[in-house]
Amino acid sequence: MRKRRSKVKRARNDTTYKARGLEKKKRERKTKAPKTRNMQTMSESEFWSFIRSALRNRTRFWKPRLEALKRARRVYNGPNKRQKWEFKCAICGNHFKQTQVEVNHIIPAGSLKSKEDLPSFVENLFCEVDNLEVVCKTCHKEHHKKQENVLQ
């Protein structure tokens, strides 16, 4: 039979840690934003992020968005028999399957960080088909990087 080790923790002497240079460092903590929304469970930024996410989620069913996809598609004639459509990127001009394209706003929807931003954000987010374009994921990423550099 094996002997079980006792689970008694040894008391460590603070001087030995100091002598070894292993003093515990105090962590600098960031001050947390006060939780003022949703029964004091959300900060202001968490609340506006929640609203922004919910609104963006609803654009999936916006008819002009679906029309933009419809205008950019063509029948797929490749070897994959399950794929019915392929979509043309408005920037590079190549064709991709639907999982590799995104619908981009030509005029950006903007930011939503306060109630003053809400009307313009909703107006720009739920726009008509003439403000939407279908782009591949790589072109979309590069496009937004360029926009961020211009703003900075």
Image: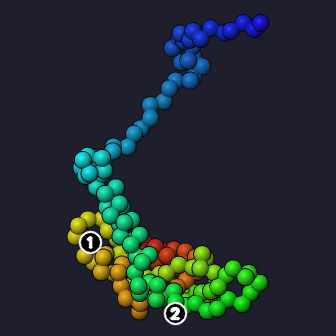
Q: What element carries label 2?
A: helix
Q: Mark 1 points at which residue?
A: 118
Q: Quadrant of residue 98?
A: bottom right
Circle 1: residue type: Leu
Residue at 72% in and 90% down: 77
Q: In which quarter of the image is residue 94?
A: bottom right
Circle 2: residue type: Arg
Q: Mark 2 points at which residue?
A: 71
In primary-sequence order, the first of circles 2 and 1 is 2
Q: How crowded is mark 1: few (under 14 residues within 10 Å), some or many (20 or more)?
A: some
Residue 9 is left or right of residue 124, and the answer is right
Q: Quadrant of the C terminus?
A: bottom left
Residue at 39% in and 72% down: 58
Q: CA–CA distance between discs 2 and 1? A: 30 Å
Above or below, 16 against 94 in this view is above
Q: In which quarter of the image is the N terminus?
A: top right
Residue 8 is left or right of residue 124, and the answer is right
* Image x and y of residue 81, in percent: 73, 82
Above or below, 146 against 53 in this view is below
Residue 134 is left or right of residue 34, and the answer is right
Q: Which of marks 2 and 1 is in front?
A: 2
